[in-house]
Amino acid sequence: MAAHRRRSEPVGPEAVETRSLHALGSSVTIVSEMPTLSPLGIVGVGQIARMTQQAALKLGIQPRLLVEGLDDSAAQAAADRVIAHPDAVAGLVEECGVVTVEHERVDIGLLQALEDAGHCIRPGIKTIRAAFDKIHQRRILLNRSLPVPVFAELNSADDLIDFATVFGWPVVIKSVRAGAAADRNVWIVESRAEGLRVMSEQAGRPLMAENFQPIVTELVVILARRPGGNIRVYPVVESIQKDGQRHVMRSPASVGREIANEARAMASSIAEHLDAVGVLAVEFFLTNDGLIVNEIAARPHNAGHMFIEGSPTSQFENHVRAVLDLPLGPTWATHSAIVTRNVIGGIDRVDPAQNLADALAVEGVSVHLYGKMAAPGRKLGHVTAVGDDLDQVDEMAMRAEAALLGRRPSW
Amino acid sequence: MAAHRRRSEPVGPEAVETRSLHALGSSVTIVSEMPTLSPLGIVGVGQIARMTQQAALKLGIQPRLLVEGLDDSAAQAAADRVIAHPDAVAGLVEECGVVTVEHERVDIGLLQALEDAGHCIRPGIKTIRAAFDKIHQRRILLNRSLPVPVFAELNSADDLIDFATVFGWPVVIKSVRAGAAADRNVWIVESRAEGLRVMSEQAGRPLMAENFQPIVTELVVILARRPGGNIRVYPVVESIQKDGQRHVMRSPASVGREIANEARAMASSIAEHLDAVGVLAVEFFLTNDGLIVNEIAARPHNAGHMFIEGSPTSQFENHVRAVLDLPLGPTWATHSAIVTRNVIGGIDRVDPAQNLADALAVEGVSVHLYGKMAAPGRKLGHVTAVGDDLDQVDEMAMRAEAALLGRRPSW
């Protein structure tokens, strides 16, 4: 927390802003033209960065955001922001005690060079590499004898045919590199023709094949880990997809205590092995043969939004605490039933902000909107309900979600 | 919520900011030079405005703040801010659907003129007048047959002597006008000489006298009211002062259900009568003769901070909902014991941000820091603990408070 000591110096944006007001004819005095420091830099554009910075401000920590445009969800809420290409992280690390990266569009070679030069980047390059490159991630997990789907690199049509010959159709084709939320990253193909079409459409993008898993359900474990190794694990979340997108998240998950504990233990062991710092999310498939690790995300995760209301410490606050090496807060569930539903834009492009009154009229549901322009498939917000009975709580959340999207409630 | 419809237009600060980047030699394109609209304007500099805007952002509402300096607690967290004298509210009302006022330094005549011209100022001038001018406030309460301390205007030394002759010493001398948090506004004087010294030191400030009330305890009722009259009342908070400042707040208050209900009913009736919109806080003295209304504040109140963690809806979110005429959220207590302690700067000027790690190590206490420079008597943050037992919860909060101030815990 050394950077905190410099809090009393004027911060960069003040200098910029006062100069700009000056240029515009205002009489505001120039505070300083010296670039100054922030304890926490955040590279991010979306709701994850937006909510992370809110958590930092609550603790009196003024983060500096590296955003890409003023309309970014994160930028709209950021008093201290730099608008530039993500590779401007090279400048951000000079100005911030710690830099945390929300999205996957930063050049990993650049991050590696910055870490090698002694800058503090979190979760750390080892973890970021594992999160960004799914082939690399799978190899790490296999080396740890953790269960993963069967997979192969797809460098040619032959690779696909070979894979399908052994494991049969359908084949799951995935982008190797974790991509922007807006991009499609997974295709389930039923035939050689379909598979080759995807490969040709996605030419230039590294792809991988994996065998199709008939799953019982999908589970997500969210945890926070400090540099010294101290870990706090949130209750297991059950995740339900709709149209290929994460849609409904419920806690507790509808699995036995043994499965839940196994998932939490595996997630902790992965965090330990990757030496992850900050929030780590591990997505699991529960199959008839048991748990399989599907994916790892090295940042606060959609499935953890429910802990804003459903735990004494939100995942965002614990992320801030972890990356700044501050003591973590409790992660237990404050309610016996918690449900979060994503508010996903429809083809009608209804703006949920227009329907806020209807959603707030659903008693006891907490509404979060991200300030994003409505577009089909875009996550525009989420709603969380807490209580004693999962189905009842889910119905409340569903009514608020439907209200925001101007629809009749439907399951 | 009409102003919401204009969300897709570029907002003012973008225009300013992009122009400024341009002036500084950056290649960022000018988005627009047109001043644009925000659904919610907030006039405020401190933690109340800071936390109110956080609540607005959660709902996807981008507020515009009128602050006085870039170091203001509210400014540090505001992406959309105007730095100017509070009287620039005359411009803010043109740019915002609704404007809410956090502090008492705005000219009431100006606000009245703006309201008369059809602008939407909340809580509304009738309420603001009652909150700002304590003589006016007392007269309103007396007209409603509500119990208030005996009081008199102090225009001369004779007024003080006359008052003391009838009601005896000590006399409480108060500033008529609600003042900035940094100013001293109340003096308990034991003699004519002491009283005259205060009056001479405060020459030019309107003062009032009231009789000294031996009180059992101090209670605060926080409520939110929509324009249509819909009211939600929070549980009664007990407030404990130290060195003349609000220090510890506990809920439930150590009073019987009857007293608590009476306080809540009186507060609702006052809100109704003032046609208040937004959060209203009514401070009561509990004396051996029953409840007396001490003061009214027409905005989120220090005693309501505990409902961030201790209720499904924070006072800040309900304030935003109320002033925008959106449905209010539930105000019940989520825990059977809630304690908030203010973190008040000491003469040693210890910066609580330096001791954040020690405070976060107190398991289960929620820490809020306001980004303010440490100074004696200044409210720098607050801590809230929730649980089942008031004394146990208070002890947790006390330990976190002491940690932030670098002191040994003491009651």
Image (cartoon, coloured by chain):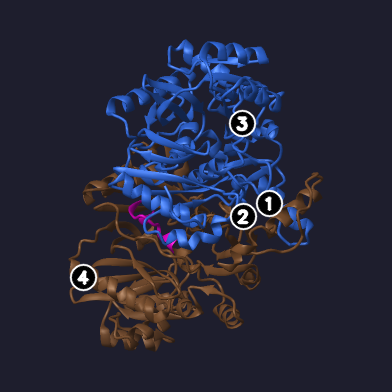
Chain colours: A blue, B brown
Q: Nearer the viewer, mark 3 or mark 4?
A: 3
**Foreground of the two, A293 or B188:** A293
How many discs appear? 4
User: Where is mark 2, residue-wise?
Assistant: B70
Q: Is mark 4 on a helix, strand or loop?
A: helix
Rendered view: B130 above or below A152: below
Closer to the eye: label 2 or 3 = 3
* Camera-side residue of B45 and A259: A259
* Residue occupied by mark 1: A31
Which secondary structure lies at badge 3?
loop
Q: x, y percentage for residue B21?
A: 76, 48
* Residues at marks 4 and 2, CA–CA distance in whole angstroms: 44 Å
Label number found at residue B259: 4
Going 22% across and 48% down the picture, which residue do you hit?
Answer: B388
Question: Type of residue at label 3?
Answer: Gly
Dot 4: few (<14), some (14–19), or many (≥20) neighbours within 10 Å?
Answer: some
Front: mark 4 or 2: 4
